[in-house]
Amino acid sequence: MCGICGVVSVEGPLAPAIQRAVPAMARAIRHRGPDGGSVVNFPQASLGHRRLAIIDRAGGAQPMTNEDQTSWIVFNGEIYNHRELRRQLQARGHRFRTSSDTEVILHAFEEFGADCVERLEGMFAFAIYDRRRHDLFIARDRLGKKPLFWGIFEGALHFGSEIKALAQSPAFDDAIDLSSIEGYLSLGYFLAPATVYRHVRKLEPACWMRLRNGSLTTHRYWSLEAFDTDHRSEEAIAEELDALVAENVKCRLESEVPLGAFLSGGVDSSLVVAHMVNAQGAGVITTSVGFGERAHNELDAAAMTAERLGTVHHPMVVTPELDGILDQIVASFDEPFADSSAIPTFYVSAMARRHVTVALSGDGGDEAFAGYDFRYAPHAVESAIARASGSVGRRSAALLARVWPRSPRLPRALRLARTFENLSRDRAAAYYADLCFLKADGARALLGLPGGSDPTESPVFEAVTAPYRQCPSKDAIQRAEYADLMIYLPNDVLVKVDRMSMANSLEVRCPLLDRRIIELAFRVPVSTKMPSLQPKRLLRRIARGRVPDEVLRLPKHGFTAPVGAWIAGPYARRFEDDVLGPDMKTSSLVDQFRVRQLFEEHRSRRCDHSYALWAVWMLERWARLRHEPADAVPHEIAGDVA
């Protein structure tokens, strides 16, 4: 795992000042690769690299070149089928100087051109520069596990693993995309290819981009094509799935440094650890974190699995001191990010890094195998009702949504206004409303903008719902899962895991996000994958006998932080000083009166506005950090550990 960066002129020679900035670009992402770094310069380009040495620690330094030094690569990630590809390339006459997967990519590009990406199995973001043709090729893995940002400033294409690398260039344009803030408040993140910066873009998952002859070309090289086509028995499907999980766990165990796993109380990480133990034997290193509040703590379930599997387990109860950790977390994202589970992810990464350099995780099980039952089950029920009731039912639901009381004092069973709203909408709009942390009316109110509860008014509505509408499956849950795979997973979950692990110089590998597992998951109909609305039926089946039954029976818990209690309690004054004080940096964006209203209701426990307040706080902290020097941000983990 590494950090990459570089600059390439669109036409003509590269400006000397921009080229001189590349070492600083690389230093800005040193946390992604503390084991070494280097820069290589050409008249029209410069490439930088920071290395976290995992495979071929002696010979895998980058930037790496081919035999005649005409093509150069910088690479972030791991290619799990590199040995097989190496044999194929050797049979075609290629000769290798190292045993690294980086060199395999370079030779594969020489042999297959842009089509090489279709042969790579793993997580990756890389750039290859051909100095003879002045040709830059950059690519990203299928599901977006490794990030890649880019922008064209003063005639030079800049790219990097994180925005902070691009920001070191004297040509960097930090103009804010104000139109993207509403989408951020609704979703909690900025939807690719957009960023908070108007002129910085994200290369989307499963895409490559080429700069050749002064023009840019972008191409999507992979997408899911088969849905609901696998009608074998549950037993046959489970057998294939189990073999795939075992194979993908095993191939992710290659490492020349200590390796372990995250272990929560859920079925996904427990299954991954079980297969690790099967491949390696007892003694696998596992780590877990939890907060003192029972609702945010799965340590007991993790401990049961660890004892059953015989792992060397390191649990940690965290009492965060936000004053010491908040700015480091905010700075790691380079743009506002409001998923509060970043906090436990940071802590578990820091805990793991004390013992290992590589950790396996269970990410991907929820999106592929129907784990988000708190969203999918209601969506399925609403879809069935909507089909049965037709247009008359939609009109009736719209009327009920307008008149139904919305008081938070109502018992939960009677809080039906949002349900009626969903029944009055088409299914894509209902999915969008369910996905959003903050509904359209709430986001617009925070910005002081007029608008009702119609989700189509959101500037990100079309982009979020496009995968749902484009999915050929007729099943509402399958379409919601597919949209989550394309939207929520790469823009929230994988961003969080990458930034929080890399902030601690830890590599994270995700066996359940192997392409073949994902493709199998969507070929399986929901009637097999989630029968009678039972989430993760297939994963639970193959985990049975390996994982304690008590763990398999637990409902989905979530990896969360008690931010609502923090804002209402010990950090109320800090929040008030930051967001409602006279030196608020986002006062031109956010309606301070509305924020004050939400804060008072939240602090008095009349309503729970945890997410809205946290999203505004993260926006404010980001605004405060924008122009602070990098060395002003703390780099030590803060908090009491028990």
Image: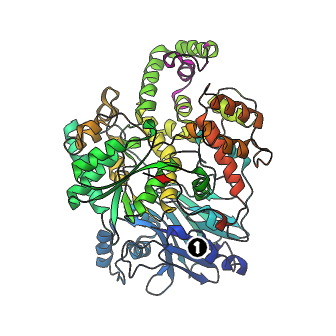
Depicted 480 relative to depicted 221: above or below: above
Residue 215 shows up from this direction: no
Find residue 324 and report its horizontal and vertical position in percent.
59, 56
Q: What element does badge 1 sit on? A: helix
* Residue 427 belongs to the span the image colors magenta: yes
Q: Is residue 34 left or right of residue 285?
A: right
Depicted 2 relative to depicted 46: above or below: above
Q: Quadrant of the N terminus?
A: bottom left
Depth check, front residue: 352 or 275: 352
Give the residues in magenta: 404-429
Q: How is the image coloured?
A: rainbow
Q: At 67% across and 47% down in the image, what residue appears? A: 619
Q: Is residue 77 left or right of residue 579?
A: left
Find residue 118 and report its horizontal and vertical position in percent.
40, 61
- For mark 1, does the 10 Å Cα neighbourhood hold few (<14), some (14 to 19), or many (20 or more) residues? many
Find residue 271 and report its horizontal and vertical position in percent.
28, 48
Q: Is residue 461 left or right of residue 367?
A: right
Dividing the picture into quadrants, the one containing residue 328 is bottom right
Depth check, front residue: 496 or 537: 496
Dividing the picture into quadrants, the one containing residue 447 is top right
* Residue 383 belongs to the span the image colors magenta: no
Q: At 23% across and 36% down in the image, what residue appears? A: 234
- Which residue is outermost to the bottom? 68
Question: What residue would you read off at disc 1?
Answer: 26
Residue 55 shows up from this direction: yes
Depicted 271 relative to depicted 119: above or below: above
Depth check, front residue: 2 or 244: 2
Q: Amino acid at mark 1?
A: Ala
